[in-house]
Image (cartoon, helix red, strand yellow):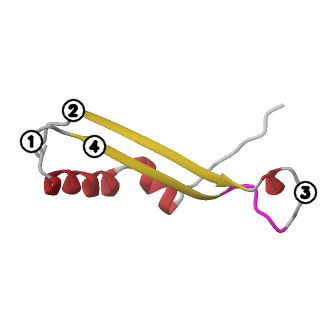
Amino acid sequence: MLGVQLDGIRIETEGDVDIRGFTSVSEKVRPGAQEFRINVHLGSKTASKEQLEKLYELGKKLSPAMDTLTHGTTIKTTYKR
């Protein structure tokens, strides 16, 4: 779309979960993740630093995963026997 040729994309994801939350050791700690960290590495032999930064910002803005993690979503659960 932007005409930027990428030679590689690598995404590193880390997260923090306090085990006391999902093991019921502490009711003061929620069972979900406390934080996620995402490091995006874009490789290109021809793109400028500015082009890669623009592509990175566009990716953050349009990523379904980023949107869901940042804004949440509705979850519907059912129990079946």
| Residue type pointed to by label 1 | Gly
Q: Quadrant of the C terminus?
A: top right
Q: Residue at x 30, y 51 (%)?
A: 59
Do callouts 4 and 1 mark residues in contact (Cβ within 8 Å)? no
Per the image, the residue denoted by label 2 is 7
Q: Nearer the viewer, residue 54 or 77?
A: 54
- Tell me the CA gap for discs 2 and 4: 8 Å
Q: Is residue 26 above or below residue 68?
A: below
Rendered image: mark on residue 3:
1
- Tell me the CA gap for discs 1 and 3: 52 Å
Per the image, the residue denoted by label 3 is 25
Q: Residue at x 41, y 41 (%)?
A: 11
Per the image, the residue denoted by label 4 is 42
Of the residues tagged 1 and 2, which is closer to the observer? 2
Classify 10 Å Cα crowding around label 1: few (below 14), some (14-19), many (20 and above).
few
Indicate the secondary structure of the residue bearing disc 4.
strand
Q: Residue at x 37, y 38 (%)?
A: 10
- Is residue 30 magenta-colored? yes
Q: Quadrant of the N terminus?
A: top left
Q: Residue at x 45, y 48 (%)?
A: 65
- Tell me the CA gap for discs 4 and 1: 14 Å
Of marks 4 and 1, which one's residue comes earlier in the chain?
1
Left or right relative to 73: residue 54: left
Q: Nearer the viewer, residue 60 or 78?
A: 60
Left or right relative to 81: residue 8: left
| Residue type pointed to by label 2 | Asp
